Image: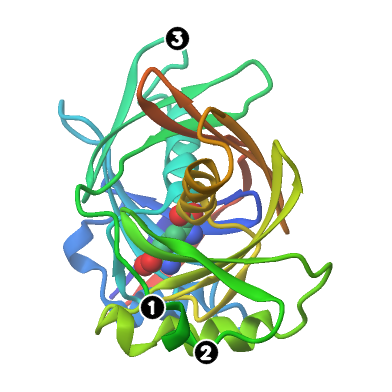
Amino acid sequence: MKKIIPFAKIEATGNDFIILDDREIAAALLSPEMIKNWCDRHFGIGADGLIHVSVSGPTTPRMLFFNADGSRGAMCGNGLRAVALHLLTIGVCHKKHDNFIEADDGLHRFTVDEQGRISVELLLNEQNEKKIDAAALDLPAGIELLGFKQVGVPHLVLKTELDEFADFEKLGRRLRSHPLFGAQGTNVNLIRMVDENTIKVRTYERGVEGETFSCGTGVTACALLCWECFSPSQKTLTVQTRGGILKVEQKSGRLWLGGPAHIVFIGQKILEN
Ligand SMILES: N[C@H](CCC[C@H](N)C(=O)O)C(=O)O
């Protein structure tokens, strides 16, 4: 039997997602194989990830995040911003209210400003530190280790002063599965300082197995390490990604990630079974 499933395709600084909600399909019907097919850029809709949101019923909307390869991820910063846009668009949330989204790693606040920029609160895992032996990473010339942070998902952060580093994808692929990070592996970020308030970030994402245009938890991990290592008194950082500008801020002890997000299109997918 064929079933037609409406979906939204949303991009958040070029990190793009298929958004489905429980009015159209139950989360239990999603399989890793189906997610992989739908996210495929040649045979499917094309996306870095797929997110299922529970919007029916009186409880806080809850998101389930899947990478393009069908694997589950506990958090996705840009995905959270995309879900916020979806909830505002379908009228489940209103911009004047206090809004929350529940995810695997906890409850996240979100806000939208007059320009439509969506900010989400990200949560630091209690055990977010991990000492990494830089020598074990065998980094190429011009690249150094800054640290490792868990912002819902694991992020290794490297730093360079090179204007361009052509082999980033190759380096990311190698370090993503380095034995230091165990079976779960890690996402890999490379930063370059532009000035004391601005950094440039590239991210190799596990689960996409390639460099994406932007990664929200990744840029947040980079900002935290920059504050710790270079300017502990600073509270705001502008982050240039391949897909646009993000801002990471610490306000009243909370960590916020903000930037643009847009609906690319609304579509219908035929589910055959
Ligand atoms: N792009 C996402 C991160 C996805 C996490 C995923 N790659 C994993 O670690 O499973 C973000 O904006 O934070």
User: Residue placed at 84% from the left, 67% from the top?
Assistant: 163
Q: Quadrant of the N terminus?
A: bottom left
x and y percent of residue 73 in the render? Answer: 31, 64
Q: Could you classify mark 1 by the number of other residues whose Cα lies within 10 Å: few (under 14), some (14-19), or many (20 or more)? A: few
Disc 3/disc 1 C-alpha distance (Å): 47 Å
Q: Which residue is mark 1?
A: 133
Quarter of the picture for ligand 1? Answer: bottom left
Identify which amino acid the numbered label 2 is placed on: Asp
N-terminal-most mark, 1 or 2 = 1
Q: Which residue is mark 3?
A: 96
Q: Could you classify mark 3 by the number of other residues whose Cα lies within 10 Å: few (under 14), some (14-19), or many (20 or more)? A: few
User: Would residue 50 be seen by someone viewing this image from the given angle?
Assistant: yes
Instruction: Give residue 138's mark.
Output: 2
Q: Secondary structure at mark 1?
A: loop
Q: Nearer the viewer, residue 254 or 50?
A: 254
x and y percent of residue 149 in the render? Answer: 37, 57
Identify which amino acid the numbered label 1 is placed on: Asp
x and y percent of residue 23 in the render? Answer: 28, 44
Side of 117 where 141 appears, left or right: right
Labelled pair 3, 1 in contact (Cβ < 8 Å): no
